[in-house]
Image (cartoon, helix red, strand yellow):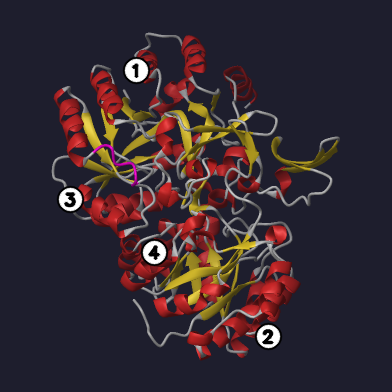
């Protein structure tokens, strides 16, 4: 049976909100929680001590805790911070940049996040020799690629799939939130704290398109692979990742947990998740198409029959 | 790794044999090319080299003292793996001077099969720090790194100083606003990205439509921009369109513009940067000629007398004519851009 994980919070929330949020998460049936700032090193309301306090509370509640690290490493200060996280003896670390992989390889077993490009079995094998114990499948790849990679998966490596949430699509040196506010990044005033689910960017026809989250760009639609749970069990996927949002994360965890244990119909789950997603859902990447597309269950069944 | 007596190499793009010859004739120290498939990040119809053309190009360049690099810088998935492995073998057998690679699995293969072949880490490998470069150096003995267009000048200096291998930076051409190798925007909209397919905002997904409001440009039906009668419409690269954020309509990510770092040459030279790369394998032989000429002249002038170096108006004008949106920027090198 796959476990459920909660990915790192990708947005900038204040300290009290974070403590409250994780207090609630401790009471959910999620198995693994990823903690820490992965988008912008200027978001410093949480000190290392605060994160460790939350980590200890979650651990006492029976959760497995992983410390996530920054995705784009540019400044020396960011590198120093990364080094200190990678040195910790208490918790496993999620590497989101090859700098972290380099620091961890041969030292500690580690996890790679979705921004590490593991696109083929030879890459997976090489990293497993260096201590990789779990990898998050890159979000733009398809079910068929996952099936191929599962067939050649090295022993002792767990596979985690991003199953729900707005997709992390791109990273830049530029802060698009600061740009929206006509501020320079060096004087950004941390305005990203105003938008707990990022800034929605729509087309000129007002169709929700992308989300601006500081230097990160996300999909406006939330990826939702609840219909694929049985397939993932068949494929031997070990962990299903839910990405946090400001509202209803606990409900979303409960929906996935109920589906995993056959206590909720998939159709009910689809309807409930649609209503909890800020601007609709998508699943195109899983089916080998454009990420923004939604392949509906009945169309998929028809296709399967034809094959 | 710095070299105070630094001569920076000029690395120019070629999408076909005429461009390659023009680049060599106009002073490129090295020319980079790709094969005719999805193994490289400029996988466009009608572009690139088969084995025979590549061999002609390599011979032509070598006879004139220039080098040829072959970019195999996309990320193979298991179903396509053989194509990438074959590309590495072909390039090695052709006698190429270096391979430009991004994927860890492919680097592992190249190191094992062709241990003497020189490897460069592609910009698609997203290495932005000495620590990340160290991974590729330690594991695969890479000898040069092309760094993403996200670092400021100060950060370039730090990386160049601490990197175990020399670095190559982008000097001119279309500007990626996102970290290369980590941008999935194109596949989110079209199913094809630089990582998986070697193209961003692929032409097959582009639609142009004249409407009452103006000329609409779409990518797989998503409206990227609408150009009024007095505006010139550019190619709908999706990060350079106009979008609505709250009640503002603007270039939310970036404007159509090209990168141009010609003014920074003395500082890049002083930082110990090993090579300046010019973007644009998809551009015409005329572009390659203009750009190679201007940059050859600039690099020579800078090397000769860095303290009194100034880009000449004629060079800058030549570059502006071939720039996206006819405008240029210092991009991330200049901190306020960020």
| Badge 2 vs badge 3, beta-carbon distance below 8 Å | no
Q: Residues within 10 Å of mark 1 (few under 14, many from 20)?
A: some
Q: Which mark is residue A250?
A: 1
Quarter of the figure with residue A112: top left
* Quadrant (top left, top right, bottom left, bottom right) of the N terminus of chain B: bottom left
3 vs 4, front mark: 4
Q: Residues within 10 Å of mark 2 (few under 14, many from 20)?
A: some
Q: Which mark is residue B25?
A: 2
Instruction: Say if residue B28 shows up in the picture.
Output: no
Instruction: Say if residue A73 shows up in the picture.
Output: yes
Discs 2 and 4 share one subunit: yes
Judging by the rendered image, the residue that carries numbered circle 3 is A87
Residue name at image x 38 percent, y 70 percent:
B157
Q: Which residues are magenta?
A: A41-46
Label 2 vs 4, first from the N-terminus: 2
Discs 3 and 4 share one subunit: no
Tally the numbered discs: 4
Q: Main secondary structure of the magenta part?
A: loop
Chain label for disc 3: A
């Amino acid at each position: 049976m796959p476990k459920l994980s909660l990915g790192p919070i990708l947005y900038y929330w204040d300290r009290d909100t974070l403590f409250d949020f994780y207090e609630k998460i401790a009471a959910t049936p999620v198995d693994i929680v990823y903690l820490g700032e992965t988008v912008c090193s200027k978001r410093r309301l949480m000190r290392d001590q605060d994160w460790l306090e939350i980590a200890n509370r979650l651990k006492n509640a029976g959760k497995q805790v992983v410390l996530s690290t920054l995705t784009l490493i540019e400044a020396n200060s960011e590198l120093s911070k990364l080094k200190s996280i990678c040195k910790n003896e208490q918790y496993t670390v999620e590497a989101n940049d090859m700098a972290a992989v380099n620091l961890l390889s041969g030292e500690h077993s580690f996890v790679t996040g979705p921004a590490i490009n593991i696109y083929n079995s030879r890459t997976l094998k090489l990293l497993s020799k260096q201590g990789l114990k779990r990898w998050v499948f890159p979000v733009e790849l398809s079910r068929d690629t996952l099936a191929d990679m599962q067939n050649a998966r090295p022993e002792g490596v767990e596979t985690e799939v991003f199953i729900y949430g707005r997709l992390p699509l791109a990273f830049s040196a530029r802060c698009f939130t600061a740009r929206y506010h006509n501020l320079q990044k060096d004087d950004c005033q941390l305005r990203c704290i105003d938008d707990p689910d990022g800034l929605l960017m729509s087309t000129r026809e007002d169709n929700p398109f992308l989300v601006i989250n500081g230097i990160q760009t996300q999909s406006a639609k939330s990826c939702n692979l609840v219909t694929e749970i049985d397939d993932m069990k068949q494929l031997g996927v070990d962990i299903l990742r839910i990405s946090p949002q400001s509202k209803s994360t606990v409900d979303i965890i409960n929906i996935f947990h109920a589906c995993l244990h056959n206590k909720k119909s998939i159709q009910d789950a689809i309807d409930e998740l649609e209503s909890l997603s800020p601007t609709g859902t998508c699943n195109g990447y899983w089916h080998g198409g454009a990420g923004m597309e939604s392949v509906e269950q009945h169309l998929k069944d028809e296709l399967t029959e034809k094959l | 790794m710095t070299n105070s007596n630094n001569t920076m190499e000029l690395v120019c793009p070629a999408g076909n044999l005429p461009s390659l010859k023009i680049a060599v004739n106009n002073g490129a120290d090295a020319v980079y090319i790709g094969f005719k498939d999805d193994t490289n990040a400029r996988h466009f119809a009608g572009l690139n080299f088969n084995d025979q053309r590549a061999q002609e190009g390599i011979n032509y360049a070598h006879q004139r003292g220039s080098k040829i690099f072959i970019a195999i810088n996309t990320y193979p998935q298991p179903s396509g793996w053989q194509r990438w492995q074959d590309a590495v073998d072909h390039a090695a057998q052709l006698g190429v001077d270096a391979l430009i690679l991004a994927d860890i699995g492919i680097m592992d293969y190249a190191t094992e099969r062709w241990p003497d072949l020189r490897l460069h880490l592609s910009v698609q490998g997203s290495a932005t720090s000495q620590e990340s470069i160290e991974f590729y150096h330690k594991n695969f003995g890479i000898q040069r790194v092309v760094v993403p267009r996200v670092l400021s000048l100060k950060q370039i200096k730090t990386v160049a100083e601490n990197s175990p291998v020399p670095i190559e930076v982008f000097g001119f051409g279309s500007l990626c606003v996102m970290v290369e190798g980590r941008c999935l925007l194109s596949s989110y909209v079209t199913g094809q990205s630089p990582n998986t397919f070697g193209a961003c905002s692929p032409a097959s997904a582009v639609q142009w439509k004249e409407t009452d409001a103006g000329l609409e440009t779409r990518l797989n039906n998503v409206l990227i921009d609408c150009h009024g009668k007095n505006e010139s419409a550019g190619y709908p690269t999706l990060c350079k369109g106009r979008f609505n954020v709250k009640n503002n309509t603007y270039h939310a990510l970036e404007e159509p513009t090209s990168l141009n770092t010609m003014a920074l040459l003395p500082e890049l030279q002083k930082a110990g940067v090993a090579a300046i790369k010019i973007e644009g394998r998809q551009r015409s032989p005329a572009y390659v000629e203009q750009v190679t000429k201007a940059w050859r002249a600039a690099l020579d002038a800078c090397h000769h007398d860095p303290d009194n170096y100034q880009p000449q108006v004629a060079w800058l004008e030549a570059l502006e004519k071939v720039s996206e949106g006819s405008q240029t920027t210092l991009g991330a090198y200049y901190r306020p851009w960020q």
